[in-house]
Image (cartoon, helix red, strand yellow):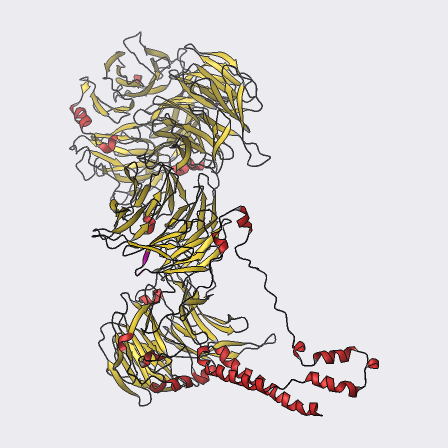
Amino acid sequence: MANKKARGPDKAKPNTDNIVVKKQEDAPDIVRQPPVFTDDSKYLCIASGRQVGIYSVQSGDKVHCLKNHSFDIIGLAIKEENVLYSCDTSGEVIEWDINDGKLLKKTSIAVEGLKEFYSFHYPRNGKFLVSSPSINEDGSSLFMFEGKRIKKIFKDVGKETQSIAFGCDQGDGSLVIGALNYQCDGVMVKDTKNVIDRKHMTDKRKFTCIAMHKEKLIMATGDISGRILIWHDFVNQIRPVKTVYHWHTLAVSSVCFSSEAEYLYSGGSEKVMVKWRLGGKRKQFLPRMGSTIKFIVNAPDNICVATSHSDNAIRIIDSTNKINRAIFGLVKHDPIRGLEDGESKKESVMPTGLVFDPRTQGIFFNSQAGFLQLFDPLRDSMIFNMDIANRNVLTDERNTVIGNAEVFRVAVSPTGEWLATLEVWSNMSVGYHDMNLKFWRYDAVQANYELNTDVTMPHHDRITSLAFQPGLLGTEYPCLVSIGRDLKFKIWRLVDDTDIYRQKESWTCDVAGDFRKMMPTATSFSEDGSLLAIAFQDTVTLWDPMTINLNTTLSHNLIEESIELMEFGRDQCFRYLVCASKSSLFAWDVISKGLVWKVGKLRSPIRCLVPDPKSSYMAVVLQNSEVFVFAPSSSKPVHTITNVMSSEPIAALFVPRPNPLANSPEWLVNSRLLIVDDQQEFYSVDDNSVCGFDEKLTTPISHMDSLPWTPFSAIKAQKQISAAKQIVPVIHQTNGIKGYKSVQSLLETSTSTLPPMSRICNSFMIDLMIKHDPKSMTVKADSENGATNDLPTLMNGHIESKMPALKEEATQQKLLTLDCQWITKN
Amino acid sequence: MDKNLFKIHSTRFYDVEPKAIHSMAYESNRLALSRSDNSIEIWNLEHSPHIEKLIPGSPEGSIEALVWSKGRLFSTGLHGFVVEYDLVALSPKASYAVTSGSAWCLAVNKAHTHLAAGSEEGYVCLFEIFEEGLMYYKVFDKQEGRILSLSWHSSGDFIVTGSSNAIRVWNVKTGHAVNRLSLGRADSFKETLVWCVCITDDFVIISGDSRGMTSFWNGKLGTLIDEVNAHKADVLCLCLSEDQKTLYSAGVDPVIVLFARVTAGVRNQWIRSVQRAIHTHDVRSLALAGSKLISGGVDAYLCISSYPPKALNRYPPLPQAPCVQMAQGKRQLLLRYPTSLDVWQLGAAAPSVYQLSANTFLKLSQEPARLLQLKAKDDEWIVCATVSPGGDYVAYATESNVYIYHFIQSAGTLQLKKLVPPEDVGTCHRMMFIHHPTEPDLSARLLLATPKLTLQLVDVGSSGSMKVVHTFSRESGQFTMGDCIHLMDCSADGRLAAVADHTSNIVILDLKSYKVHATLPRYKSHPTALAFHPSSHLLVVSYADHKIVEYDVIRRQYTPFSKKLSEKLPVQWLSRSCAVRHITFDVRHPDVIILHDDSVIYTIDKNKEFSEPDAKITKFDTGTEDSLDAPPAPLKAPSAQQQKLNSTAAGSGPSSSCFGMSKKYKHLAYFGALDVGGELVAVEVSPLALEKHLPPALYKKRFGV
């Protein structure tokens, strides 16, 4: 706080034109397109947004990041050894050198009338296969580019990448292209060499994916009933021979042949990868893969398979059917299905919203069902992913949504020591409802959260809001308030729960209260934690958090709608309580107990109301993605941004920045605004001058990687990594004691052989003393001062707390040396 | 009672025991099928499949394999003989001993010159086929272990045999084994039995074994090409198509798997393709009739399936009609079982207090009861049986004799008196009591269809010894039949009788003057049911291709209605896959013909207009889902097996179309009208009752069960 005030906003006029909305690019969707293995199966190329990441298959580390596209990438393909094609939606094709990540060539395939593309394939004979939107809204047309010539192959093809396959080059240069109709009721097959066109139909089941073998004339299709059909001789025969492989109950989302067509891999929403032995009945399973499988890609050398999952992870599975490596992006939360009516999109996509963690400066939000992730917005990386529900993941049945336990609310205590989570497992159509409020304590030694208290059914109905008490009081005596749809609010406190076995603390419900049988809808603590506001529909009640005495009730004629969001102002605006109902925004002054201002009839419902923890400003995000930044003292917005994004905003948060920004509007000096949309993409509202973290990849490609594959190169490890932990020798305190040696020698020699005390006394005492060097002392002190100057860069709690300790140690040493000087002089 | 309301006796006391199908052979629209009671059914698949002939089985007989050779039927079994059958007399014609005894398999070569039988002791025994019979030709080298399966190469020079742990290729000329292909084992202590084997023209040997493997071998080199584990348990049968491009395999795991030959480059590959799950129990035998696959097994259903397009017809193991006969006078039913007869008294409904409405159950005042169970002597097979319309005579025929009983029922006492048939009555295929309502002294005459294609008329009722009144034969008055007689009916006045044989000869005989009264024009298809109209001289005949004709016996011509009908038969009727089992009439509706097949009852109302042929046939089953398994809730069904049900039937439907149908029953053995009018009797065999007799099927783990 002190820092902030000292640094203050710049006096220069803030340049509002510079404020831009940027899409966070560094934690993107890595599973939108299937990954591609390089020819030597050493690297995996992954398209993510506008860039391509080259990952090492063995280590799972990112080796290169190829950035040059200005649109989203729609397809990757290996041109030849170490050359990668990437194509974006505008039809720009870039050739990259995989080894050094250099851009080789940039061409565009866009021609008149063909400007937008859905998917890109490269069958390795100088021809591109590109699907482009057709006049028909639902489908696309597939074109083949051969040099300058463009040939239309199919029309009414499905948009998805999985609906196009090619292969079956039986050594004569022929190319067979197969595609699924956009209505998915038929497979279209074309032999480009012998010019054979066929359309194969089966029954009513719709196809979901198609795959062809590279060389053999064999094709696989999956459908919505989970059935996989293997088609033989489908080019020449009108009624080709089909084999049925049916294990999946849900739709098959991807099928993939092994290199020799011995095996077939398939996956879907069951979260199980099935490895079929073609011809036989045997199959292998890899269950519990975490999330729905979107794509399966086989490495050319058959040693591993990569699967893309809907939780934004790519898992690499080795030949023994084990997950070897996993490449994670930011985990995406599968929207919760089967929610009761009337619950907004936010509850489905990201029920927790964005919750700031003061300890790590990260953000908590939903990851997989029942999981919570902590995301570092500075480095755009995930800090950890935590299993809150700790239950088996259930998959759906064919016509029933089963659902899983989901984390609905998260609150973090002001110091970050406590984490409260609410998980709900509910499916009223089946008739079960389960709710748990869990309190987790951060264990600094283990660097992990430890479950402290698990409260089953904390309220009789869904909890709508959780808040920890901030301020000094809240730090000392942690306190949490929860409000639920059972018309109650409850105060939870940490109490001593020591028994004869151990000393412990746990959370318990201290007070449960209600107010005129009205539904509590929102809650907020004042910045110092001295006042608790709970909104009961249109009425705001103010309570003393310690005694739970009703202080005041605030209501007004003008306010009729139920309050949905409520926040106390910060800093100078501490007295204002900003409330948001569906279409209006207003502020109460809690000291004068009057309505300060009201803005009604907003264009769109309010989605989020977020206070900036580092300034007095607040931001309101509307459903139509308008953002207003204002100070609670006045209804006039400081800044207005319209059309932040084309999609619908879900949650927002002010994220503090490590260094204050010079020459920017006041509200952007210390923090920036992050907004998440319903696609779970992050957008940041920030000053234009701020450039993102330039990530330097530290792992260069070793020379070994480009070695040709020989049995000897296989023996030689790529990297010498020892799994064994390097043992750091334990340094006992005794070794560091001055004069330890002389004491030791004194004790080891027998007393009879010792020289007279007066003779050894001097040298003994000198050994025990620290040499006094006044010059080095001052230098040390300087460096310490310098460190304190840099303190803001290391806002991390640990370091901050360590610094004074270090100082203390130094002064003690100084004292000691001064104290001992009289001995040496004697 | 309303004229359109019928009382229906829905009876379920006919307890047919399903007999597993063991082996099948198919040749030119004839399917020979052996069951576990060693009987052989010969099905005609030309139009709608139906049982044409039945060769009775015996407990000591055994049929392990059946084979056709140019219209001649051979079988072999554990008795160690190759048996040739007389298909007119429906009995074994000759038998030839197989070297060393019990034989498991039989196959004929493509040229139909030689027959090979594989024996328990490991011999392959060859017979030469002559017009007059078989001649022992040679025997191959003895091998270790039994020969379970056998197949000829199309050239006729090689035979492939399957035995335990090995498949051998034999040279027919030398009689030595050319090649021995050994199979792996699933368990080291368990022998692998090759249950079935076949060979293609290009010398690919295909075998199915007890491991559940279908293996493809190169017969020339003796190497395994491919081994597919398509079944969970033993593969019992294989069937190779005529063009040798598709192969079906089936076994204990009751799915039928289709393998298809795919030419990938130069190499032929057999690919497992679609599978059919159409049986509930082990599939024992497969046969191909063109594109149709015929399959049969332990569940006793005969299935005829084809793909594509997907089509399946299942034929329940109902005995060949007439298996149920009605004694109108006493309201009794005679049920024929393979070795016994039952006579049941139908139940009677209590007079209802309320106004009767359709689809209600009536309370029974008298439960149906079994009056008589007559077991054949020495468990002989009952070929046919009949009861006199008055119910006082019961007669049946075994393979060797005719038995006639006087069944005296008077005031609570039942008495059975055996009558001695005349000396010159041997056995017969069909029998029928001729009913003379006007002349009581002639009321009990029995018409017998003999295996010699003659008809004998026996006077039963005359005091003293019975005698043959007349014999219709080729010699006595132009009575010429081409095949065995399978249908008989007599007119209501007992003056005329109609008989039909398998070659579509339908002859009307005058039983007074003992002359042939008329001969119907011969039609291309088989007659499957015929009936005289109860009040007029009209004969209705239904053929296997679903043509129905009405013949005016007096005028000796088809009626105008018949001609009109044959032009306007509905498509839905023509596409039925079952043949008509029985035709009946109700006295209150003389213009309505009631027909039924295995599951559906049809009515044809002559008074109504014909609708377009492609129009749908009107269904009677309106209102409640009146399957008997789910009686309407408020009306409690009587506990007895017989229930009386009021239903709108017989052309009383709301539509004006002349065709009507009811799918109320699952497997209908008999549906007939009582001559008092307004009462109908349905004898149903429910699928559940059939399943009750079956052994448990192969256990399969199912998710969630």
Residue drawn where x is 32% and y is 34% of the image: A237
Seen from the viewer's position, the closer of residues B328 and A173 is A173
B248 relative to A356, above or below: above
Place of residue A41 in the rendered image (x, y in percent of width and height, measured from the top left): 45, 50
Tell me which secondary structure the magenta stretch mostly adopts.
loop
Residue drawn where x is 25% and y is 82% of the image: A636
Seen from the viewer's position, the closer of residues A602 and A36 is A36
B488 relative to A770, above or below: above
Q: Visible in this render: residue A281?
A: yes
Q: Visible in this render: residue A535?
A: no
Place of residue B394 in the rendered image (x, y in percent of width and height, measured from the top left): 38, 23
Q: Furthest-top residue in view?
A: B475
Q: Furthest-front residue in view?
A: A775
Q: Quadrant of residue A641?
A: bottom left
Q: Is residue B245 magenta?
A: no
Seen from the viewer's position, the closer of residues A312 and A669 is A669
- How many numbered discs sit on the rendered protein? 0
Quadrant of the snapshot with the N terminus of chain B: top left
Q: Relative to residue A230, is residue A764 drawn left or right?
A: right
Q: Which residues are magenta?
A: A69-73
Q: Is residue A71 magenta?
A: yes
A89 relative to A521, above or below: above
Seen from the viewer's position, the closer of residues A476 and B654 is A476
Place of residue A511 in the rendered image (x, y in percent of width and height, measured from the top left): 44, 80
Q: Relative to residue B228, is residue B639 drawn left or right?
A: left
Place of residue B315 in the rendered image (x, y in percent of width and height, measured from the top left): 36, 31
